[in-house]
Amino acid sequence: MSHYISPMEEIHQEMQLLSFTNTTPPQYDVAPPHPWPPSSRFDGPSLDLQLSISVTPMKKPNNNVIGDHHYTVETLRWQAAEQIRLAAMERAYAERLMEMTRREMELAQSEFVRARNLWDRAREEVGKAERMKERAFRISADSMCMEITCMCCTKKFRP
């Protein structure tokens, strides 16, 4: 009694056999030269692939596939942990930058207040100097007026 295998099942079995038979790349006696910059011609083995799609039910994975799956899960866990570690480092760096920026803002505000106070004091000093100048001019004008005997000339010096 012979068992009938559909063409799709046959192709699926061939693909499974091909995927397990030659998993290592072919070795060359002499390494082929790799020109730089790479040329447009491909010197490697032929990549004539014959692909097919199978609709047969999937088989249960064997122990080797489960081991590969475990390795993949561990790799993904390690990558996720690494990404979390890098994200935490970036967050800490961003927080330090924000703290430094906040301190610089506070320093700039205090310097601005100091500059404003200095400006106000300088303006007060200029006002005092102008008042002293006016007073000195009035005193000198009054003393000149005492020396001038002509009333017409005296009016020129008094405002």
Image: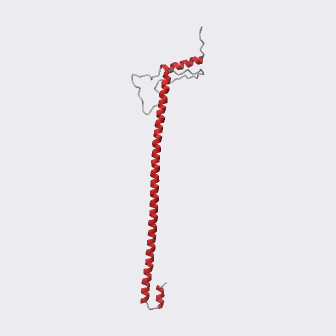
- Residue under the point 55% across and 18% down: 13
Colour scheme of the rendered structure: secondary structure
Question: Where in the figure is residue 10, as x and y percent of width and height?
Answer: 57, 17
Relative to 133, residue 47 above or below: above
Relative to 105, residue 116 above or below: below
- Residue under the point 45% across and 60% down: 110
Judged left or right of residue 9, residue 132 is left
Please state which of residues 9 and 52 is positioned toward the viewer in this rendering: 9
Please state which of residues 45 and 9 is positioned toward the viewer in this rendering: 9
- Residue under the point 46% across and 61% down: 112
Relative to 75, residue 62 above or below: above
Q: Quadrant of residue 92?
A: top left
- Residue under the point 44% across and 85% down: 142
Q: Residue furthest top?
A: 1
Question: Where in the figure is residue 80, as x and y percent of width and height?
Answer: 48, 35
Q: Residue furthest left?
A: 30
Question: Where in the figure is residue 85, as x and y percent of width and height?
Answer: 46, 39
> Quadrant location of the N terminus?
top right
Q: How many numbered circles does the render carry?
A: 0
Q: Quadrant of residue 35?
A: top left
Question: Where in the figure is residue 61, as x and y percent of width and height?
Answer: 53, 22
